[in-house]
Amino acid sequence: MTIPPISTARTAPAGAGGGASGEVGASVPDAAAGARFDRFLLGRTPDFFCFGPGATLLVAGLLLALQRMGGAASGVAATLTFCLVLLFVGPHYAATYRRAYTSLAVVRAHPWVTLAAPPILIALAILAVRYPAGVGLGYFALYVGWSGYHYSGQSLGLAMLYPLRQGARLDPKEKRMVSLPLYVSWALSVLGIFRLAIPARSAAHELVRRAYGGPPLPGWVAVLGFAALAVSFGGVAVVARRRIRRGVPLPGQFYAVLSAQVLWFTIGFYRPFFAITLVPVFHSLQYLGLTSWHACHGKGDVGPRRFAGYALVVLLLGLAINPGVFLLFGDVGAAKGLVIAAAINSFVNLHHFLLDGRIWRLRERPLVQSMIA
């Protein structure tokens, strides 16, 4: 999504929609002023767990602790991690395909990303396998660079939902200011690829890292990156102060969403296991939490049954995508297999990014109405 997740790539709700007063999503500070925020999606605690840092702190803390214990405990951590990847990453792609291709209205509204883009991306993937050092490297690098941007877009879109549901959406300038820590942390994550001395997150990441060919980045680059990240929070502080003065402070869950991504990319900078395996899981959890809520909320007594059907569909389709598609090429030689895996991974993610960037845009009135209902 780019609302943002397994790959869990941006851009899920990317804008706040509406414009002049009276439009859907327009600011109504008088209605929101002084009121305690209670317009959560799943609930206060589930929102903190799924969309904020709750899952990151609890699940990552447990898995990292098991790893440090070594022996059988380390094996348990590996098994749990594998299960989490299966349960969330593939289904997060499936949720996008379900929304995009089960509605004729969506296909008609977005023919470029639903009909035209797939054959183009497939053709590029085939060329990438045929010419891995030329077309391939460019194709893989596009996915690698866009990935963190997608994550940031999803996080921004999720965070912006809370002021929108508060009745006091962010204006364009405020949106740009609060997005700074997200996009700076994305840039930090890209730098992190080139300081690793172990295999990167995916085949595409690994091939891009190998193409660099130089020594690990010097320590001062990390210092500069973290300093820029610290400074970027100034924009959030300015917006927060202005909204407090207007009587519509940013909801606490807004900060929770921002903090989740910053944790992902800062911890992942130094903990390869976290960046390689767990960040896509948490990104996907965010995405599935939002998409399942969007598909099922407001359905009354039918809601639980609808959720069960939704979960079954995205799980089965997700497993067909990951690991299903990749297993088709399991017998290919190591070198060629890496390139093919990179091409498949890049295709799936690039199409996912394109779809999310269109089907979750909060500039569209029906989607905005569904998000604030």
Image (cartoon, helix red, strand yellow):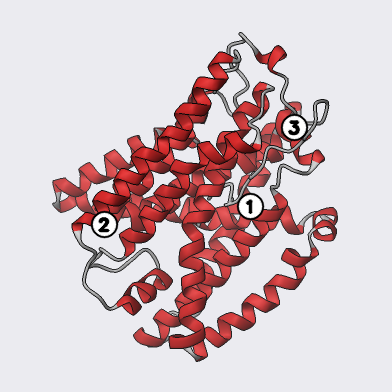
User: How busy is the neighbourhood of tag 2: few (under 14 within 10 Å), some, or many (20 plus)?
Assistant: few
How far is mark 3 from mark 1, CA to CA?
20 Å
Residue 41 in view in this figure: no
Query: Residue 95, labelled with which disc?
Result: 1
Q: Residues within 10 Å of mark 3 (few under 14, many from 20)?
A: few
Q: Residue at x 68, y 38 (%)?
A: 294
- Residue 46, x across and y down, in percent: 50, 29
Q: CA distance from mark 3 to mark 2?
A: 53 Å
**Rendered image quadrant of residue 18:** top right
- Residue 352 x, y percent position in the rendering: 61, 61
Check disc 3 and give the amino acid type.
Answer: Val
Percent position of residue 174, x then y: 58, 34
Q: Quadrant of the C terminus?
A: top right
Q: Is residue 254 left or right of residue 231?
A: right
Side (left or right) of 133 relative to 193? right
Residue 341 or residue 12, whichever sits in front: 12
Q: Amino acid at mark 2?
A: Val
Q: Residue at x 34, y 60 (%)?
A: 191
Q: Which residue is mark 3?
A: 302
User: Which kind of residue does numbered mark 1 sit on?
Assistant: Ala
Label 2: which residue? 221
Q: Give the Cα distance between marks 1 and 2.
A: 38 Å
Total count of labels: 3
- Quadrant in which residue 85 is drawn: bottom left
